[in-house]
Amino acid sequence: MPATRTTLRRSLAAAAALPLLAVALTACGYGSEAKDDTKKANVSSGGKKLSADTVKIGYFPNLTHATALVGIQEGLIAKELGGTTVKPSTFNAGPSEIEALNAGSIDIGFIGPSPAINGFAKSKGKSLRIIGGSASGGVKLVVDPKKIKTLDDLKGKKIATPQLGNTQDVAFLNWISEKGWKVDAQSGKGDVSVVRTDNKVTPDAYKAGSIDGAWVPEPTASKLVAQGAKVLLDESTLWPDKKFVITNIIVSQKFLSEHPDVVEAVLRGSVTTNAWINANPDKAKASANAALKELSGKALPPEVIDPAWKSVQFTDDPLAATLDTEAKHAVQAGLLEQTDLSGIYDLKPLNKILKAAGKPEVADAGLGVK
């Protein structure tokens, strides 16, 4: 990627700056307010505190953030922190989580690739580092089968994405471009009407007939399917090995510098959690759903959580090459100026943990700190 670092296009920067503008699940969001979940704060009994009394962790109440949901619900992250307390906060939009990280309201966050890229670019590379992976996949194009039977039928239809410039919006615009169709990225008008719709209202919009389908993450996709929509395309099929980053782990550079032991402990907890999820998928699904019920007041029904859970893969690998590709797609769509992402990753702590556990190390695609 070119070495010239420039700012984001004004409209995208403005979107990223507005905490009331929802980003996708993966950017991932439902709405925008942060929720302080202090009542769920965890501390491992009898452990020795690390260099910080507490670590403030942000994440979203959805399945693509199940590493955080399960890791906190089961106490797996707290166990690695000893006497250092976990203070969780949930967010409903990428921009608000980035703002919280910049303000010091959280130290570590689980977040999608687009807000991570935007936050890094807007701060000229000074605000955050990506320190690990969490999840891959979990994004689908679902449509009204009465109106759309093939991919070519999308032309002239109204398809929702969660937000202008978010991860799914960029992916859909890139797919449209590869079809040879034209859409104005800012307005969403063209051969396909791209309708930016908050994930929490997308099912209602579909039910009302104001959209014909949606390119969305889980569990929104499965909620639409439960209403009669059909999966026309799983985004994973567009990527090598069917893998692409949907959730990263980020940390403020200040906290990483001042408390590397705490960062390593959280990463160990994440690695332990991902291993437990993959070894116990049914128990992990139930744990994630229990956490969602506590956070939102309502668990997901089986017809939603079962297919949604199957489409998300939990991984320690941040799949850095796919983040680089997503950034290039945003540039091609006209939503991002060419931006130098060198230094966005610091995978040394994670690779230290993986090596100690006898697991293969992960790569930063040439975008790591030197």
Image (cartoon, rainbow, N blue to C red):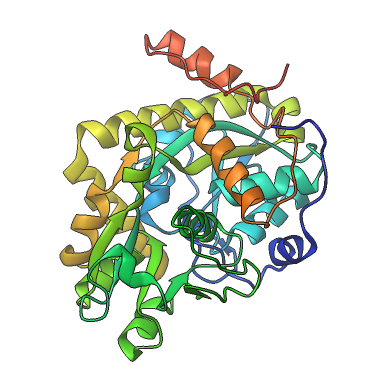
In the depicted view, which residue is nearer to us: 192 or 335?
A: 192
Q: x, y (%) of residue 301?
A: 20, 68
Name the residue furthest bottom: 208
Work out whether 327 lies above or below 183. above
Q: Is residue 149 left or right of residue 7?
A: left
Q: Quadrant of residue 276?
A: top left
Work out whether 134 lies above or below 94. above
Q: Is residue 104 left or right of residue 95?
A: right
In the depicted view, which residue is nearer to us: 318 or 101?
A: 318
Work out whether 327 lies above or below 156. above
Q: Residue at 58% across / 19% down in the picture?
A: 349
How many marks do you count on the picture?
Answer: 0
Q: Residue at 68% across / 68% down in the picture?
A: 19
The answer to whether any part of residue 46 appears in the image is no
Q: Is residue 55 left or right of residue 29?
A: right
Q: Quadrant of residue 179?
A: bottom left
Q: Residue at 19% across / 56% down in the picture?
A: 306
Q: x, y (%) of residue 107?
A: 66, 42
Q: Is residue 364 left or right of residue 286?
A: right
In the depicted view, which residue is nearer to us: 212 or 318?
A: 212
Instruction: Specify the quadrant that holds the C terminus.
Output: top right
Instruction: Specify the quadrant that holds the N terminus.
Output: top right
Q: x, y (%) of residue 120?
A: 72, 42
